[in-house]
Image: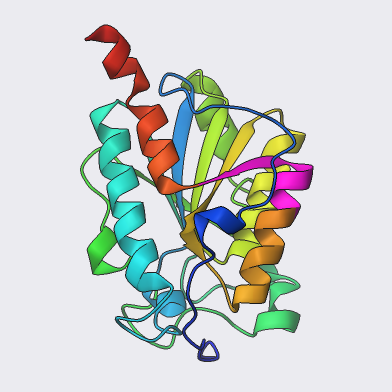
Amino acid sequence: MAMAKIAPYALPDASELPQNRVAWRVDPARAVLLVHDMQNYFVDAYTAGAGPLDVVIPRIDGLRRAAAAEGVPVVFSAQPPHQHPDDRGLLTDFWGAGLGAGEDDHRIVDALQPHEGDQVLTKWRYSAFQRTDLRERMRAAGRDQLIITGIYAHIGCLMTACEAFMQDVQAFFVADAVADFTLEDHRMALRWAAERCAVTTTAGAVTEQLGSRAQVRA
């Protein structure tokens, strides 16, 4: 089943971001960058060259480069193709059989292909923590912050932020590096994250904070 086409929309302006309940700051010694489900199957639902992905993809690319420069691990989540019904479970009731119609559906989009040293996490549910070893990877690396980018903001990205909170991981929800079905869904995700489980922020703010350690060393 192909994803329904998503009409273009402009990202919320930085001035529209909701008030955060907490004042966490990204620490490059504690953080992991998550690029969530930026696979052809999902991205192809958007209009090429239009909002929001015309902004979101370059923002994600900039963040992963900043992360790499500071030694921050980069993790890509990716759903597998041709999922067995037992693995897919209730997702089938809502979204059908999922990836598999096209041989490249499961691939990360060309503009964000993982670099050497990046990790690719096989993902089975909305949250990138469910049925994966993401928390164990973070714990082994001594990291307890997660910078969240990708799609879709009000589904997998938001559920990942919520579960991060419930596992005592500080989540940073990057407003201009996530995309959604509609502007309304996007704004809802930002508001819920800011009020309940994460810091809602911008790619520029995260990049600045990622570089703070280098500035201190200098």
Query: From the viewer's perspective, is 171 left or right of 142?
Result: right
At horizontal 65% and vertical 46% (from top left) the residue drawn is: 161
Q: Position of residue 124 (x, y in %)?
A: 60, 60
Indicate the quadrant containing the N terminus: top left, top right, bottom left or bottom right: bottom right
The residue positioned 70% from the left and 31% from the top of the image is 22
Magenta run includes residue 92: no
User: Relative to residue 214, is residue 202 depicted above or below?
Assistant: below
> Can residue 126 be spotted in the picture?
no
Residue at 73% from the left image edge and 41% from the top image edge: 197
Which residue is at 36% across, 54% downward?
60
Q: Nearer the viewer, residue 53 or 22?
A: 22
Q: Is residue 54 left or right of residue 46?
A: left
Residue 52 quadrant: bottom left
Residue situated furthest front in the rendering:
15
Q: Residue 197 versus residue 102: which sits nearer the camera?
A: 197
Examine the rendered structure and indicate whether residue 141 appears above or below residue 58.
above
Q: Quadrant location of the C terminus?
A: top left
Q: Which x, y percent locates residue 75?
A: 41, 44
Q: What stretch of residues is rendered in magenta?
A: 192-201
Q: Position of residue 67 (x, y in %)?
A: 32, 35
Task: Determine whether 160 is above or below 42 in the image.
Answer: above
- Residue 204, percent across and down? 38, 44
Residue 111 appears in the figure: yes
